[in-house]
Amino acid sequence: MRRRDLSRRLLLLVTAVAWACREPKAKARTAPVASVGAPPGGELAFEREVDGNLDLYLIPAGGGKELRLTDDPAEDGLARFTPDGERILFTSLRTGKYQIYEVSPKGGKARRVRTNDATEYQVDVSPDGKTLAFLSNLDGPERLLLQDFGSGAVRELVRHGNDTIFGNPHWSPDGRFITFSSNHRIGHQIYVVEVATKQERRISPVTGGGCEPRFSRDGKKVVYVSRRHLGGVSRLVEHDLASGEERALVSWPALNYDPVYSPDGSELAFASNITGQYAVYRQRLADGKAWRVTYGPGLARYPDYRPAR
C-alpha cells in the first residue's frame, strides 16, 4: 500500500473486518474495451496518484486532456459533484485528519466545509443541494450524519454501535433515501435508510456482502461492489429495490470498484485494475460495450460524473 494513497487507505479502513471488499494483489490482464477512445459523455472528476501524491482531476468522459484540480502535499480524494455541477466536495488529509473540502471544477483554492477535530469523510450532497451526508466520529463512534446547509444544524441519521465501520453514503434521486455500507453484525453489507423515518433495511445477500453502493438515476436500483469468494475478482452488481433481483453489470476478471451511473443512466463509470494498475473505464449498459478513459502514470480511481447542465 503506497504511503499517500488515500483510496487504498480508506478502502482498507472501510473493509478491515469485511472480507467482501478486500483487495489482494491482482495480475495484469487485457482490458476488454471496445476501442482506445470513449465516445463523448460529459465530464468525470476522479483521483490520480502520481509519485506518491494523490490529487483530484477532471477529464472529458470521452477521454483527453486532464485538468488537475488540487495540488497539495496532503491526500485529496473521493470526489463528489454537487447537484448543480458547480462544486466538487472531497476528502483531504490537510489537517492531519480526514476532513471535508470543496473545490471548483475549474480548479483553484480549496475551501474547508466543516471545522472540527473529528475524522469526517465520504461526503454526498442531497439532490436539492440543501443537505450534506457524511461519515464522522464527532462526539463518539463513527456515524452517518446530516448537515443542513442553511442552518448548519447537524443530526444523526444512522448509528450501528461503537465499532462499526461505514462506507460511501449516496442519496437517492428524490432525496428520500440514502444507501450506504456497514459492517454491523454480519460483515460489510449494503443498506438503504429512509431519511425522514430513519428506517433502514439491508439489501445485499447476507452470504455475499458488498461496498460502495450508488443509486441508479431513476432511484429504482442500487449498484455496488460484490466480492463473495471470487479471490482477486470483484463484480459490479445491480440490485433491483422492488424485486430484490440482482444482475452483474461488470464481471471482468479483475478488481472492479467505484461504480457510478452516468447522468442519463445509460452507462457506468468505474475503476478496474485489469491491466495491473487502476484506470477509469465506462461501460454502456445496453450492450456491455466499454471504453478506457484515463491513461498515463499513476493509479486513477473514484470517478464521478458532472451532472448534466
Image (cartoon, grey):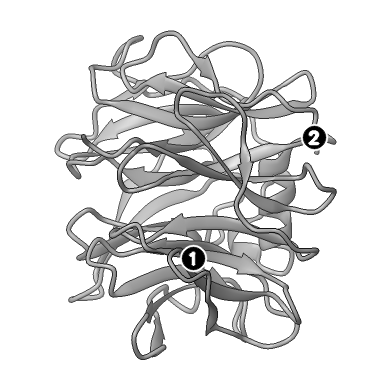
| Nearer to us: label 1 or label 2 | 1
Image quarter hosting the N terminus: top right
Residue 251 is situated, as x and y percent measured from the top left of the image, at 39, 43
Q: Which mark is residue 133?
A: 1
Instruction: Pick whichever, 256 or 101, lies toward us.
Output: 101
Image quarter hosting the C terminus: top left
Residue 218 is situated, as x and y percent measured from the top left of the image, at 17, 58
Residue 117 is situated, as x and y percent measured from the top left of the image, at 80, 63
The amino acid on which the numbered mark 2 sits, given as a three-letter code, is Arg
Q: Quick check: can you spot residue 233?
A: yes
Instruction: Pick whichever, 206 or 292, lies toward us.
Output: 292
Q: Name the residue at 25% across, 61% down.
A: 173
Q: Say above or below: 256 vs 150.
A: above
Q: Name the residue at 74% across, 80% down.
A: 141
Instruction: Pick whichever, 40 or 106, lies toward us.
Output: 106
Would you identify the image quadrant in which residue 197 lies?
Answer: bottom left
Say what secondary structure mark 2 lies in.
loop
Q: Name the residue at 48% across, 20% down.
A: 30
Which residue bears the numbered disc 2?
4
Q: Name the residue at 23% across, 17% down.
A: 39
> What crowding class fits label 1: few (fewer than 14 Cα within 10 Å), some (14-19), or many (20 or more)?
many
Compared across the picture, whether 138 is left or right of 236 comes to: right
Q: Say above or below: 277 vs 191.
A: above
Say what secondary structure mark 1 lies in.
strand
The amino acid on which the numbered mark 1 sits, given as a three-letter code, is Ala
